[in-house]
Amino acid sequence: MSSTDAVTFWDGVHAARPARDNPSPNVRLTEVVTGLPPGDALDLGCGNGGDTLWLARAGWRVTAADISAVAVGRLTALARTHGVHDRVTAVRIDLRTSFPPGTFDLVSAHYLHTPYDLDRSAVLRAAAHALRPGGRLLVVDHGSTAPWSWNQDPGARFPDPTEVAAGIGLDPAVWSVERADAPRRTATGPDGGTAEVTDHVLLVRRAA
């Protein structure tokens, strides 16, 4: 499927959701990042911007990337409204063909799933190589299907964090796995409904 199809799909997903005045960050981001010294962060697939805003408020300088111009436009406006526009750069980018330039102390990829072809392993490998010494790559994937997910395929399989790490294929002499687990939590969907879901969490650190 073409890049145009993917852009149209994700613009439609975001346009169909009401814009939020103060979107919440993902819980796995806050539990991992709280206590880390702020630096430069890359939010891959920034979506509604909750993670980016939380990081910016905590003092991080954030590059927020998403394929959807709707998501990027909303986040740019939110950053200005919340007074963190000087620490947020939101860019529309198709990770199938390019990757944000720069180096980072943190790269966060939350629920970077798509119905379109995407070499995720290559994207996450590029993310790991974009880390500065001592930097961390946080990958949080769906480990189960939520009632509000765009993917309701009952046969969907969710690779566990160790499989994701193996697929990235990083040199263990340079990158180490700090966390690889599958915690459960109660999540709230866009319509306010709740469900118990599983997260697949992978945290990789580049050697200092």
Image: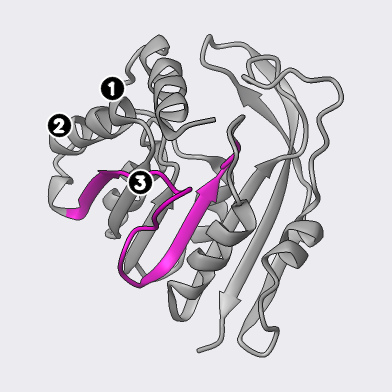
Quarter holding residue 20? top left
Q: Residues within 10 Å of mark 1 (few under 14, many from 20)?
A: some
Query: Could you tell me if the residues under marks 1 and 2 are in contact, i.e. CB atoms within 8 Å?
Result: yes
What is the three-letter code of the residue carrying label 2? Thr
Tell me if residue 81 is in the magenta stretch.
no
Name the disc covering residue 65, or none.
3
Q: Earlier in the sequence, mark 1 or mark 2?
A: 1
Q: Please indicate whether residue 175 sits to the left or right of residue 47 in the image.
A: right
The spot of residue 140 in percent (x, y) is 62, 48
Q: Earlier in the sequence, mark 3 or mark 2?
A: 3
**Nearest the camera: 152 or 107?**
152
Q: Residues within 10 Å of mark 2 (few under 14, many from 20)?
A: few
* Residue under label 2: 81
Q: Earlier in the sequence, mark 3 or mark 1?
A: 1
Residue in the image at 15% along x and 31% along y = 81
Mark 1 and mark 2: Cα distance apart in space:
9 Å
Q: In the image, which residues are magenta?
A: 87-113
What is the three-letter code of the residue carrying label 3? Ala
The spot of residue 115 in percent (x, y) is 61, 29
Q: Please indicate whether residue 29 sits to the left or right of residue 171 in the image.
A: left
Quarter holding residue 78? top left
Name the disc covering residue 21, or none.
1
| Helix, strand or loop status at disc 3 | strand
